[in-house]
Image (spheres, rainbow, N blue to C red):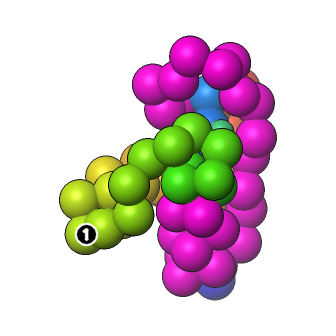
């Protein structure tokens, strides 16, 4: 089963954050939401979770992309 990648460089951000989170989809989503809230000051909610889940990529896809 492919793991999912959340690459913070792909999110609109003023802090230039380079964090990448890799794991199973629910793990990545949870960690990315916590990160977005604590570091980037986003508001936790269905909107944020939806936006993040749409940006998740398969680990294999990302590895071949670069
Ligand atoms: Zn970040």
Q: Residues within 10 Å of mark 1 (few under 14, many from 20)?
A: few
Chain part drawn in magenta = 10-34
- The image position of residue 33, as x and y in percent, is 52, 62
* Residue on which disc 1 sits: 46
**Quarter in which the N terminus is drawn:** bottom right
Give the quarter of the image for residue 32: bottom right
- The image position of residue 34, as x and y in percent, is 60, 64
- The image position of residue 8, as x and y in percent, is 62, 38
For ligand 1, the image quadrant comes to top right
Front residue of 58 and 8: 8
Q: Which residue shows up at 62% across the image and 28% down it?
A: 9
Front residue of 11 and 44: 44
**Badge 1 residue CB within 8 Å of ligand 1:** no
Position of residue 40 relative to residue 13, above or below, is below
Position of residue 18 relative to residue 47, above or below, is above
Magenta stretch: residue 38 in it?
Answer: no
Q: Which residue shows up at 66% across the image and 20% down it?
A: 15
Front residue of 10 and 33: 33
Q: Which residue shows up at 45% across the image and 25% down it?
A: 12
Specify whether 30 is left or right of 49: right
Magenta stretch: residue 23 in it?
Answer: yes
Specify whether 49 is left or right of 16: left
Callout count: 1
Position of residue 64 relative to residue 46, above or below, is above
Q: Which residue shows up at 72% across the image and 56% down it?
A: 21
Specify whether 65 is left or right of 54: right
Residue 6 visible? The answer is: no
Kind of element beneath mark 1? helix
Residue 64 visible? The answer is: yes
**Quarter in which the C terminus is drawn:** top right
């Amino acid at each position: 089963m492919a793991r999912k990648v959340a690459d913070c460089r792909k999110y609109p951000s003023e802090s230039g954050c380079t964090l990448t989170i890799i794991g199973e989809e629910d793990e990545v989503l949870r960690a990315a939401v916590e990160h977005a809230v604590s570091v980037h000051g986003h508001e936790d909610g269905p909107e944020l979770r939806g936006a993040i889940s749409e940006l998740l990529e398969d680990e294999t896809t990302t590895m071949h992309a670069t």
